[in-house]
Amino acid sequence: MVVPRPSGLPIVQFRSRTGSIDLGWGHPHPAALPVEGWADASHAALRRYGGAALTYGHATGPGPLIEWLCERLGEVDGAAPEPGQVFVTAGASHALDLVSAVLCRPGDVVLVDAPTYHLALRIIADHRVDTVAAPADEEGIDPDATAELLARLARQGRRVAMLYLVPTFNNPTGRSLPAGRRAALLAVAARAGVPVVEDDTYRELAYPAPAPASLFSAAEPGTVVRIGSFAKSVAPGLRLGWLTAALPIVDAVAARGYVDSGGGVNHANALILAEFAALGWYRRHVEAIRSRYRRQRDALVAAVRDELPQARFAVPDGGWFLWLRLPHPYAGTELLPHAEAAGVCYVPGRQFFVTDTGHRYLRLSYSMCDPETLTEGVRRLAGAYRAAGLPVGSTTGPVGDPAPG
């Protein structure tokens, strides 16, 4: 019997308003989703593994995917993890939730970058901790100032459970933490006994490759937990990601009740992804989307330079986002209703900070739209900016903002 799909019920997370250009959501371009390759890999995986692809899986993830992932990270990062250091998750958000559950206790302090991925702040807050911004400037977290903050918290008797950051192609700024700061921050965290949770979601989206080496690959064993995702490099609907960590963390995650009960996470999709890689689809797909997203980034950058000369920004070397600083201290917040009325959307900068700051900033995503649509979106944004009566003169000074907030 064929059961008809219910009419009118949504099947995807994002649905744009008719006539509106959404530069807010960090979603892949629809044409960049590998429908043909995934169908090919799905059939191949079922032929190869048969019923083993559709039963309960191994707690940390299926061996074929873990083995390939270790090899791939050896190619695109500073070092390959050992298979025992890998746990397959249902995306990076799931990985962060699992790690937070293992590392945090209610009332702990969690340090975060400023600005940082806004939805990560919600995930961390679910664990009833106090989220505190680490000192940062235009290059990212300041290691020396962070050491002073950690010492101050220790004197207050506060336990710092972890430090979360996106050091490579940061969301929202697109910047990467410089090599010297990476080493210094690792040293500070190690001395304080604070685990670093590295969100490495955008590693494959480097323009050009390779991305900077991860904190995980440079750190002493046991000091960094790195989380990653196939949402950007393949497709978010797979709900597949991973974490790499020292064996005690991997064992603690694998021992959680729902993992033990369910037999791993997304076992069938994990085996299909392993086949997707074995057939060469992954490598070809990543090369194609790097080219696509680089073109889209360049189109957005050119449009902002032409239409919004008063905006300051750094051209990102990877990822999906452009972070704009506007002259008026509340421009990013006050512009939004005017932009929406003009048929364009973005994410205001305030959402990426723990404290009530960041109002002059806004984040634009170039991932979901063609170059022509990006250009039109910025044209509408510039018109909304003028309609809002905000300053129209060019901002002086170097690209980048020495004092986020």
Image: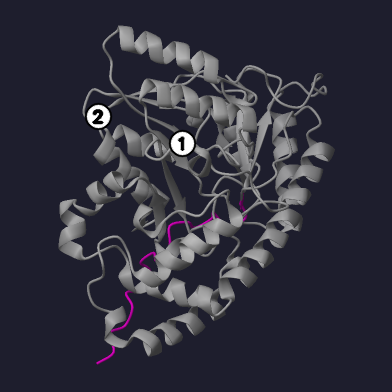
Report whether 170 appears left or right of 371.
left
For residue 263, the mark is: none
Give the amino acid at mark 1: His
Report whether 167 appears left or right of 98.
right
> Which segment is the magenta one?
1-21
Q: Is residue 7 a member of the stretch shown in magenta? A: yes
Residue 96, position as x, y percentages in the image: 36, 44
Q: Tell me if mark 1 has few (under 14), some (14-19) or many (20+) residues whose alpha carbon lies within 10 angstroms of its own.
A: some
Residue occupying the point 59% across, 59% down: 75
Element type at mark 1? helix
Residue in front for this viewpoint, 400 or 150: 150
In which quadrant of the rendered image does the N terminus lie?
bottom left
Residue occupying the point 50% across, 55% down: 80
Residue 237 higher or lower than 93, as above or below = below
Residue 5, position as x, y percentages in the image: 33, 78
Residue 154, position as x, y percentages in the image: 32, 12
In which quadrant of the rendered image does the C terminus lie?
top right
Q: Is residue 360 a member of the stretch shown in magenta? A: no
Looking at the image, is mark 2 or mark 1 nearer the viewer? 2
Q: Quadrant of residue 18?
A: bottom right
Q: Quadrant of residue 169?
A: top right
Give the amino acid at mark 2: Arg
Residue in front for this viewpoint, 398 or 253: 253
Determine which residue is flagged by label 1: 118
Label 2 to label 1: alpha-carbon separation: 17 Å
Determine which residue is flagged by label 2: 128
Is any atom of residue 304 visible in this view? yes
Element type at mark 2? loop
